Image: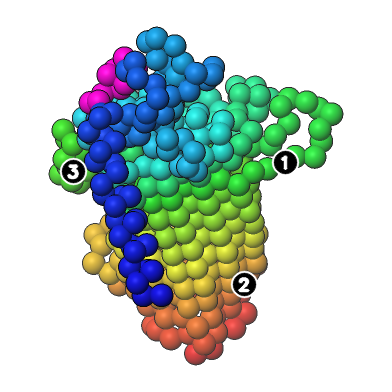
Amino acid sequence: MTKRLFLIGIYYLFAFLVIPNILFSQNKVYSIADLVSVKDTNSLVYVAEAKRGGLFYYRGLAEFEDGGTVFKSKFEGYWIRVDRESNEASPLWWGAMGDGINDDIQAIENATDYCLRNNKVLKFSSGIFRISRQWIIGGKPVHERDIFSRQLATAPSWNIRQYEKSRFSNPIKIVGSSQTFIYGDFDNSTIEAILYFGVISNGNSNRPNPQFYTSEISDIGFYGRGSFNKGKFNQTALSSISNQQIGLLVYRSQSIRISGCKFYGLKFGIVAQDVYFSEISNTTFSTCLFGFQGIGFNANKLDNVLADNCKVGIKILGSVVVCRLLNFEFCETGIEFSGEGLVINGMYCENDNLKKPNKFQIIFNNASGVQVNSANLTSGNRDIIFLDEKTKDVTITSSALYGPIKTSHPDNILTIKSTKGNYRKSGPGKTGGFSN
């Protein structure tokens, strides 16, 4: 048995090391331009181009030339990328450089369209992918003014049916690495990327039951204009929050997962409008005006989210939101919530030495059904919790509170149980229970 395993090992070693060397030495070119000029169609051809290269085979039947996986020969037939058979596709195949200098938006768009058409995973390598316009992942270009007009409601100028007609019907999974950065180097008053997977009605009023798909973005960094200079990180340019970009807009969507992403140097890291049954986890918002903003954000989950040096870490207008392990460092306000049904299990907010205006660490506006468990709020002389006049009931348990708590109306009901610290309440609100 041992000898047999040894022989098998020798065979595979020969197959992986020797055969490719023989093959590539006879069928090797150095660019895609060279590939399409190859006349020998009986063998595989290896393209040794640094980022775009790979192994190709010839096919005489008609194919759709997409500029990344299929290239038309100058003679007849097509050269097919062997990796087309895998479940992943890279924007490098379409010419993206990921060097922070070249404009990669066209390559990224082409790769995105390919993945949507063929149900593939869009796989980014490490690198700084500079884009000069919005990256549209389904839908059409959107301007910030259309999102926030009419008191954060959908703008009347949006033709929703046209959006639905224009979007792809497949979900998409986008995966990067810890060193994958999307760098929006363009007009700083718009959106870097839009993930639009709304109701699949295609404008047909005879289909009243909406259908949804699941999509995922993981391990991607969205960085605002000025974050990089000639491919090098430029922290000095973002010492203050001045960028007006939105990193990622998730619009009219359900079952979206965003994990392991970072948003840096933006006006808004993520804006999620009309989003349901979705999750944001292991994600960081840094040096943003607003880290995350949810509008019509219902039945969703935030898990292990960090916001640092933001004016507001998380702002939500919605209902039935569950949060776990929220960490706010040097933010004027950690979380602001308006709606019904918020549960926070584990939250840390440390702003003791922050020289900022006296903003509350937690703000409840017209909120009800709020449950906060295991929170640690340290603010020095700053107020830590504020209940506006329309907020009904807030319960805090098993926490450590160090700072003032302010109520605004006699109908405010604040219940604090099994909690330590030098917290103190002011204002006319009722105390449903104060026990340590």
Q: CA distance from mark 3 to mark 1?
A: 42 Å
For label 1, the SS is loop
Which comes sooner in the sequence, label 3 or label 1? 1
Crowdedness of circle 3 by 10 Å Cα count: few (<14), some, many (20+)? few
Query: Residue 5 sits in which quadrant?
Result: bottom left
Disc nearer the start of the sequence (2/1): 1
Query: Which of labels 2 and 3 is toward the front?
Result: 3
In the depicted view, which residue is nearer to us: 34 or 154? 34
Residue 427 versus residue 33 in the image, above or below: below
Toward which corner of the image does residue 401 lie, by quadrant? Answer: bottom left
From the top left corner, tell me how far across and down residue 272 is, in percent: 53, 44
- At numbered mark 2, what does the secondary structure look like: helix, strand or loop? strand
Q: Amino acid at mark 2?
A: Ile
Give the magenta-colored segment's residue range: 29-37
Crowd around label 1: few <14 · some 14–19 · many ≥20 (10 Å):
few
Q: Is residue 436 visible?
A: yes
Residue 31 is inside the magenta segment:
yes
Give me the residue at 37% from left, 10% from top: 74
Label 2, on which residue? 413
- Quarter of image, res 414: bottom right
Q: Point out which mark residue 233 bears.
A: 3
| Position in image of residue 278 (x %, y %) | 58, 53
Q: Quadrant of the N terminus?
A: bottom left
For label 1, the residue is 211
